Amino acid sequence: MGERVRALRLLRSVTKEMLLMWDRGLHSYAMVSATLSKGCGYLGRIPSNVKFLNETQLEDGSYLSFINPPGKFRKKGFKPIQIRVIEYTIENLNDPTAEIKYRLITSLLGLKNFRQSYWLPNIINVGKSKIQLMNSKYIF
């Protein structure tokens, strides 16, 4: 049994009060859909090869987009799910001229100012590194 299947099975333990976080290997339409069906919020890292269209640019540098169902889900009538995409860079401490880029997706669509949310810097704990949302002048 694969990691994604196991992760989906673990969703039976989440509740509405939780914010579920996952790494890029668990990214999928099925994971997003199943998490939302539990009433739980999510924040997940996405692989660099996964692309999302910028449907609505938000003030804080993040944007709204949609995650589309794969073919087998589309045939069963599943619809695209709206997501928020957060792109950020981390300064590489070993090479200050290089930056490491990351992207997250979340169900937290209504959070007005994501970069000033108290928990984001705590989730992305990178020690003394600087974190900056792409397209943003603000640094944590």
Image (cartoon, rainbow, N blue to C red):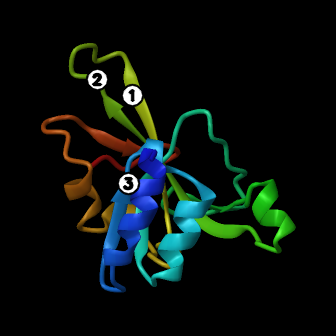
Q: Where residue 90 appears, x then y in whole percent? A: 33, 34
How packed mark 3 is, by other alpha carbons closer than 10 Å (few <14, some 14-19, many 20 or more), is some
Q: Amino acid at mark 3?
A: Trp
Residue 58 visible in the snapshot: no
Give the residue number, with chain letter if any, for mark 3.
Answer: 22
The residue lying at 21 percent from left, 21 percent from top is: 93
Distance of label 2 from label 1 (alpha carbons): 6 Å
Distance of label 1 from label 3 (alpha carbons): 19 Å
Q: Amino acid at mark 2?
A: Asn
Nearer the observer, disc 2 or disc 3?
A: 3
Taking 57 as reference, is 75 left or right?
A: right
Do tag 2 and tag 1 residues touch (Cβ < 8 Å)? yes
Pick the residue in front: 40 or 84. Answer: 40
Distance of label 2 from label 3 (alpha carbons): 23 Å
Residue 34, above or below 8: below
Give the residue number, with chain letter if any, for mark 2.
Answer: 92
